[in-house]
Image (spheres, rainbow, N blue to C red):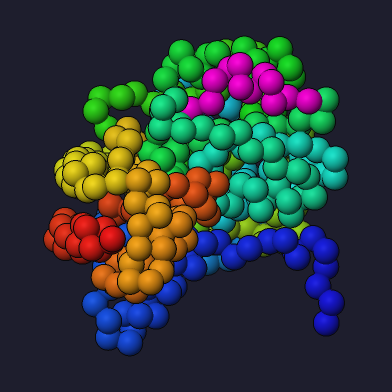
Amino acid sequence: MELAQRVKEIKPSPTLAVDAKAKALQAQGVDVIGFGAGEPDFDTPDNIKEAAIKAIKAGFTKYTPAGGTEELKKAVCQKLKKDNGLDYEPAEILISCGAKHSLYNICQALFQKGDEVIIPAPYWVSYPDMVMLAEATPVILKTTEETGFRITAKQLEQAITPKTKALILNSPSNPTGASYTKEGLMALAQVVLKKGITVISDEIYEKLMYDNVSFFSIASLDPKLKAQLLVVNGVSKSYSMTGWRIGYAAGPRPVITAMTNIQSQSTSNPTSISQKASLEALSGPQDFIPIMLKEFDKRRTYMVDRLNAMPGVSCYKPTGAFYAFPNCAGVFGRKAGTTTITDSTSLAQHLLESVNVAVVPGVAFGADENIRLSYATSFANIEKGLDRIQKAIEGLT
Ligand SMILES: *Cc1c(COP(=O)(O)O)cnc(C)c1O
């Protein structure tokens, strides 16, 4: 059977692929330490689970409106007002099956052949593929540790052409953990306003920030931006609810309506029960977040310090999310037996095969000198896994 052209260039999500490979080894009885996880290792808080159980028992188990329930949309509006100072109405909100689904719907609603979409690298793996599935062209802007993995206003302005439709921003970032300062975002916002492009702001790691660094949404900087901007967020990362599949988008009403129509013809509504759980997540007690954050912070410092102490490895200290993204170019050219480590893929393969540690090669994020390690795993695992990585790296000749 002949596949459609549209899907021929699409790759399966490499982060999920590494996870699957590590899990397959584990199933064979191999003691694998997995740093591939893209989700918090905490359980979903009890009050959220209880809300879901209550919804099931009350028979809240039927279709809801395709774009989500009015009560959850209202809760999202309140969240955006309280946390980000943004004014949105329920008609400007879409609830979808995860933030990923909101991003996908945005791409389908806005992009078409001939459009260029600017994506700063290192980028979240799904952005370029989602843009390509909408038949548009991803334009990658490279950033490095030296600039804190942030694009500058000048870099953005130079990349904009008459074909540029949008910029996808992700702060704090997966995979780098870097976040933009208010000043940095203001400079980008000026270019966005001047050039009239759309900004898609993926704020899924908003609540996971360290070192007293504050979160700023680019949306909050200038009310004029509202007509050109979509905010994407969700409950997966903040409330350890990845499996519940609830995310949301806020934006101009015609775009939200178009996204709702796409959703109504594809998935229909996000799970009714998960919507009730998410309502509790957004409007119930928030004390789970600082507890999770404190533990992540401890692991972050330990992991980054250990990585920086390894020969040939240098690791930027992330200010958000739950990933370390060390640059390993210093070990490229060294040998493991007869094979030479030449890039992020051969390094990741070497770590998996020689010491059974799973990491994600940076090439998946558009950064072939780096690997991504998630610290959303126990401290004991982190210690053990880093001991193994150190041994593997020190063993290179
Ligand atoms: C995890 C993640 C998402 C998607 O989260 P959902 O589970 O689909 O809500 C979106 N963007 C980034 C950068 C992520 O890391």
Q: Residue at x 24, y 77 (%)?
A: 31
Camera-side residue: 296 or 354? 354
Q: Residue at x 41, y 63 (%)?
A: 340
**Does 189 sit left or right of 159 as displayed?**
left
Q: Residue at x 50, y 58 (%)?
A: 245
Image position, residue 45 (x, y; %): 27, 54
**Residue 151 falls within the magenta-colored stretch:** yes
Residue lying at the far bottom of the rendered structure: 28
Camera-side residue: 247 or 15? 15
Image position, residue 326 (x, y; %): 34, 45
**Does 372 sit left or right of 128 as displayed?**
left
**Residue 134 falls within the magenta-colored stretch:** no
Query: Image quarter for residue 230?
Result: top right
Segment tinted magenta in the rendering = 150-161
Q: Is residue 131 above or below residue 41?
A: above
Residue 50 visible: no
Q: Is residue 213 above or below residue 50?
A: above
Image position, residue 162 (x, y; %): 83, 25
Q: Residue at x 24, y 47 (%)?
A: 311
Q: Quadrant of the C terminus?
A: bottom left
Residue 316 visible: yes
**Does 259 sit left or right of 96 as displayed?**
right
Q: Quadrant of the N terminus?
A: bottom right
Q: Is residue 393 above or below residue 370?
A: below
Camera-side residue: 267 or 306? 306
